[in-house]
Protein backbone atom coordinates (compact mmCIF):
# COMPACT_ATOMS: atom_id res chain seq x y z
CA UNK A 1 0.00 0.00 0.00
CA UNK A 2 1.10 3.53 -0.73
CA UNK A 3 2.28 5.70 2.15
CA UNK A 4 -0.16 8.46 1.15
CA UNK A 5 -3.39 7.39 -0.54
CA UNK A 6 -5.74 9.75 -2.30
CA UNK A 7 -9.26 8.93 -3.44
CA UNK A 8 -10.66 9.22 -5.99
CA UNK A 9 -7.88 9.26 -8.60
CA UNK A 10 -10.08 10.94 -11.16
CA UNK A 11 -13.39 12.75 -10.84
CA UNK A 12 -15.65 14.69 -13.13
CA UNK A 13 -18.31 16.79 -11.45
CA UNK A 14 -20.79 19.47 -12.41
CA UNK A 15 -20.66 23.13 -11.52
CA UNK A 16 -22.32 23.80 -8.18
CA UNK A 17 -21.89 20.30 -6.80
CA UNK A 18 -20.19 19.61 -3.49
CA UNK A 19 -17.29 17.22 -3.72
CA UNK A 20 -14.88 15.72 -1.20
CA UNK A 21 -11.36 14.50 -1.88
CA UNK A 22 -9.90 12.16 0.67
CA UNK A 23 -6.38 11.52 1.85
CA UNK A 24 -5.04 8.93 4.27
CA UNK A 25 -1.46 8.20 5.30
CA UNK A 26 0.47 5.41 6.99
CA UNK A 27 3.63 7.45 7.59
CA UNK A 28 2.64 8.42 11.12
CA UNK A 29 3.34 12.05 10.25
CA UNK A 30 1.72 14.86 12.18
CA UNK A 31 1.56 17.34 9.33
CA UNK A 32 -0.70 17.11 6.32
CA UNK A 33 -1.24 19.44 3.37
CA UNK A 34 -3.42 19.97 0.33
CA UNK A 35 -1.99 21.48 -2.85
CA UNK A 36 -3.35 22.10 -6.29
CA UNK A 37 -1.24 21.93 -9.40
CA UNK A 38 -2.02 23.89 -12.54
CA UNK A 39 0.09 23.93 -15.72
CA UNK A 40 2.73 26.65 -15.54
CA UNK A 41 1.81 27.62 -11.97
CA UNK A 42 3.49 24.85 -10.03
CA UNK A 43 2.07 23.85 -6.67
CA UNK A 44 -0.08 26.16 -4.61
CA UNK A 45 -0.97 25.48 -0.99
CA UNK A 46 -4.69 25.31 -0.17
CA UNK A 47 -4.77 24.23 3.50
CA UNK A 48 -2.47 22.60 5.98
CA UNK A 49 -2.76 20.95 9.36
CA UNK A 50 -0.02 20.38 11.94
CA UNK A 51 -2.15 18.12 14.13
CA UNK A 52 -5.76 17.03 14.52
CA UNK A 53 -6.81 20.26 16.22
CA UNK A 54 -4.83 22.58 13.97
CA UNK A 55 -6.12 23.81 10.59
CA UNK A 56 -4.55 26.66 8.64
CA UNK A 57 -5.35 28.41 5.39
CA UNK A 58 -2.84 28.43 2.60
CA UNK A 59 -2.48 30.92 -0.21
CA UNK A 60 -5.60 29.86 -2.16
CA UNK A 61 -8.16 28.63 0.39
CA UNK A 62 -11.22 30.47 -0.97
CA UNK A 63 -13.84 28.01 -2.18
CA UNK A 64 -12.32 25.11 -0.24
CA UNK A 65 -12.68 23.63 3.24
CA UNK A 66 -10.90 20.82 5.03
CA UNK A 67 -11.43 18.35 7.84
CA UNK A 68 -8.76 16.53 9.81
CA UNK A 69 -10.71 13.52 11.02
CA UNK A 70 -7.73 11.76 12.59
CA UNK A 71 -3.97 11.98 12.52
CA UNK A 72 -3.99 9.83 9.40
CA UNK A 73 -6.89 11.42 7.52
CA UNK A 74 -7.26 14.84 5.94
CA UNK A 75 -10.07 15.58 3.49
CA UNK A 76 -10.59 18.51 1.15
CA UNK A 77 -14.05 19.73 0.16
CA UNK A 78 -15.21 21.99 -2.61
CA UNK A 79 -18.48 23.40 -1.30
CA UNK A 80 -19.79 24.48 -4.69
CA UNK A 81 -17.47 23.45 -7.48
CA UNK A 82 -16.67 25.87 -10.30
CA UNK A 83 -14.80 25.23 -13.57
CA UNK A 84 -11.65 27.11 -12.53
CA UNK A 85 -11.20 24.56 -9.76
CA UNK A 86 -10.37 22.02 -12.45
CA UNK A 87 -6.85 20.93 -11.51
CA UNK A 88 -4.66 18.18 -10.15
CA UNK A 89 -4.88 18.01 -6.35
CA UNK A 90 -2.18 16.58 -4.15
CA UNK A 91 -2.13 15.59 -0.52
CA UNK A 92 1.23 15.55 1.24
CA UNK A 93 2.62 14.77 4.69
CA UNK A 94 5.73 15.70 6.62
CA UNK A 95 7.38 14.87 9.91
CA UNK A 96 7.23 17.63 12.51
CA UNK A 97 10.38 16.36 14.19
CA UNK A 98 12.42 17.25 11.13
CA UNK A 99 10.68 20.59 10.88
CA UNK A 100 10.49 20.21 7.15
CA UNK A 101 14.11 19.22 6.66
CA UNK A 102 13.19 15.66 5.73
CA UNK A 103 10.92 16.66 2.88
CA UNK A 104 7.39 15.78 1.97
CA UNK A 105 5.69 12.54 0.98
CA UNK A 106 3.07 13.06 -1.70
CA UNK A 107 0.05 11.08 -2.78
CA UNK A 108 -0.49 10.21 -6.43
CA UNK A 109 -2.98 12.98 -6.93
CA UNK A 110 -6.65 13.44 -7.78
CA UNK A 111 -7.47 14.83 -11.20
CA UNK A 112 -10.65 16.87 -10.81
CA UNK A 113 -12.62 18.23 -13.73
CA UNK A 114 -15.53 20.60 -13.14
CA UNK A 115 -17.87 20.91 -16.13
CA UNK B 1 8.63 36.40 1.50
CA UNK B 2 10.35 33.24 0.40
CA UNK B 3 10.50 32.39 -3.29
CA UNK B 4 12.05 29.86 -5.65
CA UNK B 5 12.86 30.57 -9.29
CA UNK B 6 13.54 27.79 -11.75
CA UNK B 7 14.53 27.94 -15.38
CA UNK B 8 11.58 27.59 -17.69
CA UNK B 9 11.19 24.47 -19.73
CA UNK B 10 10.86 22.31 -21.47
CA UNK B 11 14.46 21.24 -21.48
CA UNK B 12 15.00 18.85 -24.37
CA UNK B 13 18.11 16.66 -24.46
CA UNK B 14 19.42 13.62 -26.21
CA UNK B 15 20.21 10.53 -24.17
CA UNK B 16 23.62 10.68 -22.43
CA UNK B 17 23.73 14.48 -22.55
CA UNK B 18 24.67 16.58 -19.53
CA UNK B 19 21.79 18.15 -17.60
CA UNK B 20 21.64 21.36 -15.62
CA UNK B 21 18.41 22.82 -14.28
CA UNK B 22 18.96 26.15 -12.57
CA UNK B 23 17.30 27.06 -9.29
CA UNK B 24 17.76 30.20 -7.22
CA UNK B 25 15.97 31.18 -4.06
CA UNK B 26 15.25 34.00 -1.66
CA UNK B 27 14.64 33.27 1.99
CA UNK B 28 14.70 35.20 5.23
CA UNK B 29 16.31 32.44 7.28
CA UNK B 30 18.56 29.45 6.59
CA UNK B 31 16.39 27.12 4.59
CA UNK B 32 16.66 23.47 3.67
CA UNK B 33 16.64 22.95 -0.08
CA UNK B 34 15.05 20.16 -2.09
CA UNK B 35 14.57 18.77 -5.56
CA UNK B 36 11.43 16.80 -6.27
CA UNK B 37 10.63 14.81 -9.41
CA UNK B 38 7.20 14.15 -10.87
CA UNK B 39 6.93 11.34 -13.40
CA UNK B 40 3.92 11.35 -15.74
CA UNK B 41 0.71 10.49 -13.92
CA UNK B 42 2.34 10.39 -10.51
CA UNK B 43 2.81 12.56 -7.46
CA UNK B 44 6.01 14.32 -6.53
CA UNK B 45 8.87 12.28 -5.08
CA UNK B 46 11.75 13.65 -3.10
CA UNK B 47 14.86 13.34 -5.27
CA UNK B 48 17.50 14.93 -3.05
CA UNK B 49 17.99 17.51 -0.35
CA UNK B 50 20.56 19.66 1.41
CA UNK B 51 20.10 21.23 4.82
CA UNK B 52 23.05 23.62 5.12
CA UNK B 53 25.45 25.66 3.05
CA UNK B 54 27.96 23.69 0.92
CA UNK B 55 26.05 20.43 1.44
CA UNK B 56 25.72 18.31 -1.69
CA UNK B 57 22.59 16.24 -2.12
CA UNK B 58 22.75 13.29 -4.48
CA UNK B 59 20.52 10.46 -5.66
CA UNK B 60 20.13 8.34 -8.81
CA UNK B 61 23.04 10.13 -10.49
CA UNK B 62 21.57 13.58 -9.82
CA UNK B 63 23.30 16.05 -7.56
CA UNK B 64 22.90 19.60 -6.34
CA UNK B 65 25.04 21.76 -4.08
CA UNK B 66 23.66 24.31 -1.61
CA UNK B 67 25.38 27.58 -2.54
CA UNK B 68 24.57 30.22 0.04
CA UNK B 69 26.75 32.88 -1.57
CA UNK B 70 24.82 32.69 -4.83
CA UNK B 71 21.51 31.51 -3.26
CA UNK B 72 21.40 28.65 -5.73
CA UNK B 73 20.73 24.91 -5.79
CA UNK B 74 21.22 23.83 -9.39
CA UNK B 75 20.36 20.26 -10.36
CA UNK B 76 22.90 18.35 -12.48
CA UNK B 77 23.30 14.92 -14.00
CA UNK B 78 26.21 13.81 -16.10
CA UNK B 79 24.37 11.49 -18.48
CA UNK B 80 20.58 11.57 -18.75
CA UNK B 81 18.40 8.67 -19.78
CA UNK B 82 15.00 8.54 -21.44
CA UNK B 83 13.61 7.38 -18.09
CA UNK B 84 14.63 10.73 -16.55
CA UNK B 85 11.92 12.48 -18.55
CA UNK B 86 9.77 14.15 -15.91
CA UNK B 87 8.99 17.48 -14.28
CA UNK B 88 11.52 18.66 -11.69
CA UNK B 89 10.61 21.01 -8.84
CA UNK B 90 13.00 22.97 -6.70
CA UNK B 91 11.74 23.81 -3.20
CA UNK B 92 12.84 25.33 0.07
CA UNK B 93 11.68 24.89 3.63
CA UNK B 94 12.31 27.83 5.90
CA UNK B 95 11.66 28.45 9.54
CA UNK B 96 9.92 31.75 8.84
CA UNK B 97 7.08 32.04 11.32
CA UNK B 98 8.06 28.69 12.76
CA UNK B 99 6.00 26.80 10.22
CA UNK B 100 8.61 25.35 7.84
CA UNK B 101 6.03 25.32 5.06
CA UNK B 102 7.86 24.56 1.82
CA UNK B 103 7.85 26.94 -1.09
CA UNK B 104 7.97 25.34 -4.54
CA UNK B 105 9.23 26.57 -7.87
CA UNK B 106 6.99 26.27 -10.91
CA UNK B 107 8.67 23.14 -12.19
CA UNK B 108 10.88 22.41 -15.19
CA UNK B 109 9.88 19.78 -17.69
CA UNK B 110 12.70 17.55 -18.97
CA UNK B 111 12.29 15.59 -22.19
CA UNK B 112 15.02 13.12 -23.10
CA UNK B 113 15.07 11.66 -26.60
CA UNK B 114 16.72 8.33 -27.48
Image: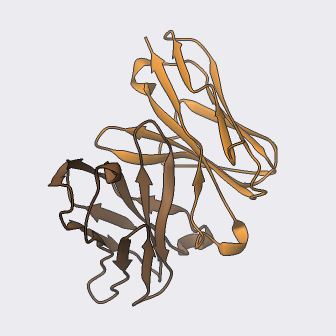
Chain colours: A orange, B brown
Q: Left or right? Give the position of A64 relative to B6.
A: right
- x and y, in percent, of residue B21 in the image: 25, 65
Which residue is more in the foreground, A82 or A36? A36
Point out the image quarter for the N terminus of chain A.
Answer: top right
Question: Taking B59 as reference, is B43 above or below it?
Answer: above
State the image quarter where residue A39 is shown: top left
Can the viewer see residue B107?
A: no
Q: Left or right? Give the position of B50 relative to B100.
A: left
Q: How many marks?
A: 0
What residue lies at 43% left-to-right and 75% top-to-bottom? B58
Point out the image quarter for the C terminus of chain A.
Answer: top left
Question: Taking B71 as reference, is A86 above or below it?
Answer: above
Q: Left or right? Give the position of B23 relative to A63.
A: left
- x and y, in percent, of residue B2 in the image: 40, 68
- x and y, in percent, of residue B46 in the image: 51, 61
What residue lies at 58% left-to-right and 73% top-to-bottom? A101
What residue lies at 62% left-to-right and 25% top-to-bottom? A8
State the image quarter where residue A65 is shown: top right
Amino acid sequence: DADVTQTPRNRITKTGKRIMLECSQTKGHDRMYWYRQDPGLGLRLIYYSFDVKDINKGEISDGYSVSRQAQAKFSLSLESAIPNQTALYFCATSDSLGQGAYGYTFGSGTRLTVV
Amino acid sequence: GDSVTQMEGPVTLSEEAFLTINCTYTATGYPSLFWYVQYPGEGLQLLLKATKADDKGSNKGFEATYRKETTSFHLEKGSVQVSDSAVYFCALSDQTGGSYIPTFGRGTSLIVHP
